[in-house]
Image (cartoon, rainbow, N blue to C red):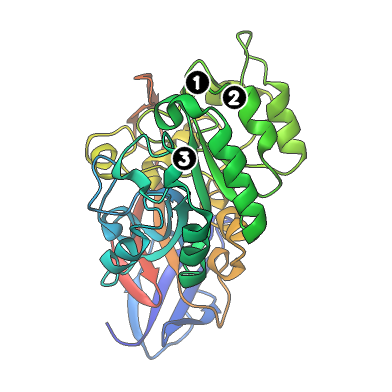
């Protein structure tokens, strides 16, 4: 495709019809449909456009099993222009993660696992000698344009007998480096009531809709005080669907109490991309459409909200002069079976499907 082209007959979610001109990798013009142009035209009739989708929680290091995948397989091929690797690698392998994505088209940021071994093992915080502030500091300094925060997985299979000690150390390091931390929650111990109070404003609580016994709602379905307190002090709630971390029933309870996601992310890697229940960001977004959230809020959770957390507002808007990162999609009135991490099946009547992306000015169909 030429360096200058026009995406014609697009619609914003508001149903405003527009054409978008891309030139030299940037958005050159946003005009009314049908204005005379002398450039290559791509007919996008029937498609919505948003700023490029951002998946705030993926695993994009292909060497690790089970938590790994090729970057573009979970990025642009699924209509996602930017992903954030959620702690696949610690200090030992961050350079390898970045090297593995050098020929990919998808934009990459990353959380640095506080354990230097990362997800080479899934009990990476069972041995505190694997947590070195010196190595973390050096790695953050070396890859400051890529690393957006630290990652700590605080569940029983990861920390073993260490309880919340890894999180206390992680918070001390994150404060010293002025970096937020993404905290994975799951099965206890440690108890969720001991984890969440250690988190601060701008930290991310991921997997907040999981249904394991150590979740954020009590046996009567009431939100725990630590959850409501966390929301009040500015903790960021991220879905992080994953293989075992999203429940329709918990999501419905949260919605009833007005406890709303800040970002919708997948926690996608090769296995749950190919075998479910994740499949793609579009598939996960469709679950929240099914739950009754407006399309505007669902798309914002994978665009503007994620861009705001990343402090990169240009990734969450469509503005003349900005790098062209766009997602083209449809909302189709057709039945689709949606399955959560508990095996709960729901039949939805609408589904979101990606049709194309523009990533740093390059157009690709999905």
Q: How many labels does the image show?
A: 3
Residue 55 visible from this viewpoint: no
Q: Are marks 1 and 2 in contact (CB under 8 Å)?
A: yes
Provide residue 185's location: percent of width, then percent of height: 51, 31
Label 3: state its secondary structure. helix
Provide residue 11's location: percent of width, then percent of height: 49, 62
What residue is shown at x 28% (from left), y 47% (from top)?
68
What residue is shown at x 45% (from left), y 31% (from top)?
159
The Cα atoms of the two marked residues, 1 and 2, are separated by 7 Å
Nearer to me, 30 or 82: 82
Residue 128 visible from this viewpoint: yes
Q: Are marks 3 and 1 in contact (CB under 8 Å)?
A: no
Numbered tag placed on residue 361 in the rendering: none
What residue is shown at x 67% (from left), y 16% (from top)?
222
Q: Is residue 27 above or below residue 102?
A: below
Crowding around mark 1 (Cα neighbors within 10 Å: few <14, some 14 to 19, many 20+) is some
**Quarter of the figure that contains the C terminus:** bottom left
Label 1: state its secondary structure. loop
């Amino acid at each position: 495709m030429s360096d200058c082209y026009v995406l014609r007959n697009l619609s914003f979610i508001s149903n405003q019809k527009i054409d978008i001109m891309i030139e030299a990798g940037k958005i050159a013009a946003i005009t009314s449909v049908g204005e005379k142009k002398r450039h290559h035209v791509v007919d996008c009739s029937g498609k919505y456009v948003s700023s490029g989708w951002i998946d705030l929680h993926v695993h994009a290091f292909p060497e690790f099993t089970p938590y790994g995948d090729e970057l573009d397989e979970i990025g642009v091929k699924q209509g996602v222009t930017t992903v954030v690797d959620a702690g696949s690698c610690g200090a030992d392998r961050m350079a390898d993660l970045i090297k593995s994505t050098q020929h990919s088209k998808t934009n990459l940021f990353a959380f640095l696992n506080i354990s230097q071994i990362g997800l080479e093992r899934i009990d990476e915080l069972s041995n505190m000698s694997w947590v070195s502030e010196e190595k973390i500091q050096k790695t953050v300094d070396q890859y400051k344009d890529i690393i957006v925060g630290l990652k700590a997985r605080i569940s029983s299979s990861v920390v073993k007998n260490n309880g919340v000690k890894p999180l206390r150390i992680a918070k001390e390091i994150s404060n010293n480096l002025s970096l937020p931390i993404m905290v994975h929650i799951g099965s206890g111990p440690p108890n969720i009531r001991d984890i969440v109070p250690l988190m601060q404003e701008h930290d991310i609580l991921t997997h907040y809709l999981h249904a394991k016994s150590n979740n954020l709602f009590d046996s009567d379905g009431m939100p725990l005080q630590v959850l409501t307190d966390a929301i009040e002090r500015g903790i960021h709630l991220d879905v992080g669907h994953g293989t075992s971390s999203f429940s329709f029933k918990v999501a419905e309870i949260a919605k009833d109490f007005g406890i709303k996601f800040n970002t919708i992310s997948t926690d996608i890697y090769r296995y749950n991309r190919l075998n479910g229940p994740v499949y793609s960001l579009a598939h996960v977004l469709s679950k929240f459409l099914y739950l009754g959230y407006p399309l505007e809020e669902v798309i914002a959770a994978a665009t503007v909200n994620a861009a705001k957390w990343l402090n990169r507002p240009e990734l969450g808007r469509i503005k003349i002069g900005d790098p062209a990162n766009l997602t083209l999609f449809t909302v189709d009135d057709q039945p689709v079976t949606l399955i959560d991490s508990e095996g709960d099946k729901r039949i939805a009547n609408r589904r979101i499907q990606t049709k194309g992306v523009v990533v740093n000015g390059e157009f690709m169909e999905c």
